[in-house]
Amino acid sequence: MNCRPFIVPVFIPHAGCPHRCVFCNQEVVTSQPEMHPGPEGGFATADEFLRFRGRRQGPAQIAFYGGNFLGLPTERIRCLLTTATAWINERKLDGIRFSTRPDTIDSHSLDLINSFPIKCVELGVQSMDDDVLQQSRRGHTATDTVVAVRRLQARGYDVGLQLMVGLPGDDEARMMETGRRIASLNPAFVRIYPTLVLEGSLLATWFREDRYRPLSLNEAVDLSMKLYRFFRQRGIPVIRTGLQPSEGLNLDSGMVAGPFHPAFGQLVQSACYLEAVRGALGRGDRLPDTIELRVHPSSSSHLRGQGNANLAALRREFGFLNVRVMPDSTLIDEVIALPEGKMIRVYEPIDADFIDLF
Ligand code: SF4
């Protein structure tokens, strides 16, 4: 199962959405106006994108993102899938994926897509807490997600789940419970997005009325780190953390407030490295003045953190005078060697006997 194919996106901002969820403005996220693409529109852009693939090997999938794909009228769904299938028959692509809401997965929609070469369905889950879903005006429940995942998996699709940190009414305990319930569904992968206050969204109105406070960048990174580690330790790939920067998504225009950072995913990974070292050192131990940490050269920047922030944190928290990072190409990725031959894995696997929560 390869969940990381080359993705050729066709953005369909808000197409098929029954309403606007409080946090959403896909026109800002995708830098494209609300649209229902015809074969000549979104596909023309996808064709250009495909040229970027160059000589890269591996599967390529066309992806309908930015809307609620199975909420589109039946004829529109059929038309988009037929055009995409023609590309696959021409060997330009290997498969199709799309994002859709959990409450669109029923026997009618599954029968509709059955004859097309769809590999993967991404569900906008956002939370598994019904109160958070309600406050975010999602219009579906956690049970809808459970049912949708089971139906899709029964038909053999890879199922990716998207979730958000910092939604109205959410907190760390609820978020981690969402993580546990999502992990127990055994998804092929997850994506983690911080909630941003986007211009034109209801959340922007609430923010201006002091009814919603976004997470700070540090809070969002910390929560995302906890989720990221949780999934990785259970062997569930996290294929994205944070939104891709786009023209519309910056502090000067589309974004009102919130924990946006162009390298959000890197901050989260660095936080994971820091957390792993913290856990291994243990507080209260007698520690030397200087500590040397070795990692594979490709992981060196994760261990250091942005602007060496992780090294500063270790000095501050453990009283080291000096923290050295030494690149060591004999080590495998995501392993840190501490003094006295101690080795730690950043995402130490946990034998998870998941309790079936449902
Ligand atoms: S979150 Fe999904 S369903 Fe809600 S408005 Fe945005 S694209 Fe539509």
Image (tube, grey):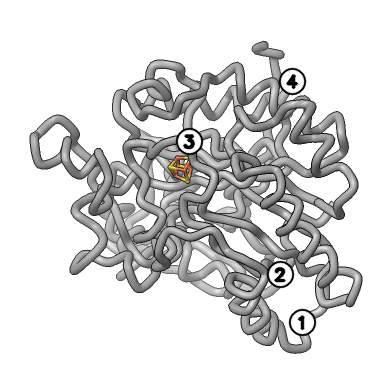
Q: Position of residue 115 (x, y in %)?
A: 90, 47
Residue on which disc 4 sits: 353
Dot 2 or dot 3, earlier in sequence: 2
Q: Is there a contact, CB below 8 Å, between mark 1 and mark 4?
A: no
Give the structural element (helix, strand or loop) at label 4. Answer: loop
Dot 1 or dot 4, earlier in sequence: 1
Q: Nearer the viewer, residue 246 or 314?
A: 246
Q: Nearer the viewer, mark 3 or mark 4?
A: 3
Q: Which of marks 1 and 4 is in front?
A: 1
- Residue drawn at 48 percent across, 35 percent down: 18
Dot 1 or dot 2, earlier in sequence: 2
Give the structural element (helix, strand or loop) at label 3. Answer: loop
- Residue drawn at 36 percent across, 29 percent down: 136
- On the rendered image, what quadrant is the C terminus found in? top right
Give the Cα distance between marks 3 and 1: 38 Å
Dot 2 or dot 4, earlier in sequence: 2
Residue 257 drawn above or below residue 305 = above
Q: Which of marks 2 and 4 is in front?
A: 2
User: Disc 1 residue type?
Assistant: Arg
Q: Nearer the viewer, mark 2 or mark 3?
A: 3
Give the Cα distance between marks 2 and 3: 30 Å
Q: Is there a contact, CB below 8 Å, between mark 1 and mark 2?
A: yes
Q: Which of marks 3 and 1 is in front?
A: 3
Disc 3 under 8 Å from ligand 1? The reply is yes
Residue on which disc 2 sits: 6
Q: Where is residue 121 in the image (x, y as percent from the top left)?
A: 71, 45
- Residue 56 - label: 1
